[in-house]
Image (cartoon, helix red, strand yellow):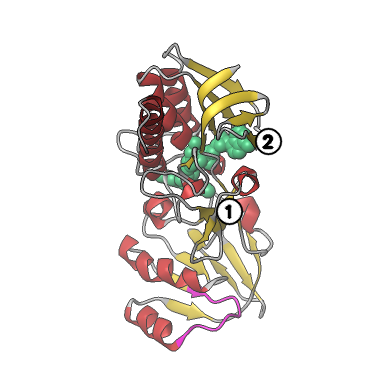
Amino acid sequence: MSYEVVIVGGSYAGLSAATQLARARRKILVVDAGVRRNRFASHAHGFLTQDGTPPGEIARIGKEQLLAYPTVTWREGRVERIAKRADGTFDVDGEHALRVILATGVRDDLPAIPGIVERWGNSVFHCPYCHAYELDRGAVAVIGSHPMAEHPALMLPDWGGPVTYLAHGNPVAAEAREHMQRRGVTIVPNKIIEVRDHATAVLDDGTQLAFAGMLVVSQTHPSSPLAAELGCTLAESPTGGTYIQTDAMKQTTVPNVFAAGDAAMMMGSVTLAVGDGAMAGLSVHRSLIAERAGLNH
Ligand code: FAD
Ligand code: MG
């Protein structure tokens, strides 16, 4: 089968891109493996009109509304391979596509501290805006596994609870130490051996510190190797993670390959993924029109 656009990933960014293209009556295929980044969280916060809605519910409504358009084909599953044809179009697992949008999201690489992964999205988070309000001014710990953790540590006092920076045996630069002191953040130098119970840090001297929640820096990478396999340039984020480099119109460094959402941003949210996806959808449509009209684009 031949499609104008194949969208890889049918979560917030992919759905948003697809909706713009469906409304322009473009023939599109969305392939989605259904493994959203926020699948660990029971509620999504901060997305306008859906604050506190379960993440899967937001995606479900988006999919239902998208599938009302007649030019949309939806396939569950994982795209394994995208091959470039000599004419600049693509074979996506055997389907022909003029354009590809990668909306595959990211995978979170968390510090290797026992107990972190099991609590991810429940009592251990990466984003103050997504989850800190629900800690209800309770005590919060920031795990200093990466120097970038100093940023949430300096932000979190605004949410109203006591903030502890667990340096996890890592040095804290004099300037950061001074900033944290000024913000009322307690610095604990010890290594964390384990996180247990709701969010209790067990330190290397046997001390146990209980918190309402913990913030951790997650190193994110595109969850799929497709961008790298296609030859798209990846940019490095300040946490040492990577994301697909695009221009402001969401065009990657490979012609006719676009990318949107967490996979194409330094840091993401549902709101940003939806905006990014919409931009990718418009941009792809614009490039199809330009090509048909014989214009340079
Ligand atoms: P995703 O939602 O991750 O979706 C990517 C989709 O692409 C998935 O369905 C995946 O299966 C699919 N896919 C990947 N590779 C392939 C392939 N090869 N073939 C087919 N399909 C593929 N943000 C908020 O705004 N509010 C919150 O409260 C919030 N809470 C969060 C809690 C946690 C624990 C985490 C980790 C994140 C949270 N986020 C929150 C961030 C939010 O999850 C992301 O910003 C958002 O999911 C990005 O949307 P996306 O469409 O780019 O990617
Ligand atoms: Mg998506």
Q: Residue furthest top?
A: 70
What residue is disc 1 on? Answer: 221
Who's the residue at 43% across and 88% down the image?
174
From what the image shows, is residue 205 above or below residue 28? below
Q: Is residue 35 visible?
A: no
In the rendered structure, does residue 174 fall within the stretch colored magenta?
no
Q: Position of residue 58 (x, y in %)?
A: 43, 30
Residues drawn in magenta? 165-173
In the rendered image, the vertical position of residue 63 relative to residue 255, given as above or below: above
Quadrant, the C terminus: top left
State the CA–CA distance, disc 2 to disc 1: 18 Å
Given the current orientation, which residue lies at the most extreme bottom position? 174
Q: Residue 192's mark? A: none
Q: Nearer the viewer, residue 115 or 92?
A: 92
- Relative to 182, does residue 274 appear above or below in the rendering? above
Of 189 and 267, nearer the camera is 267
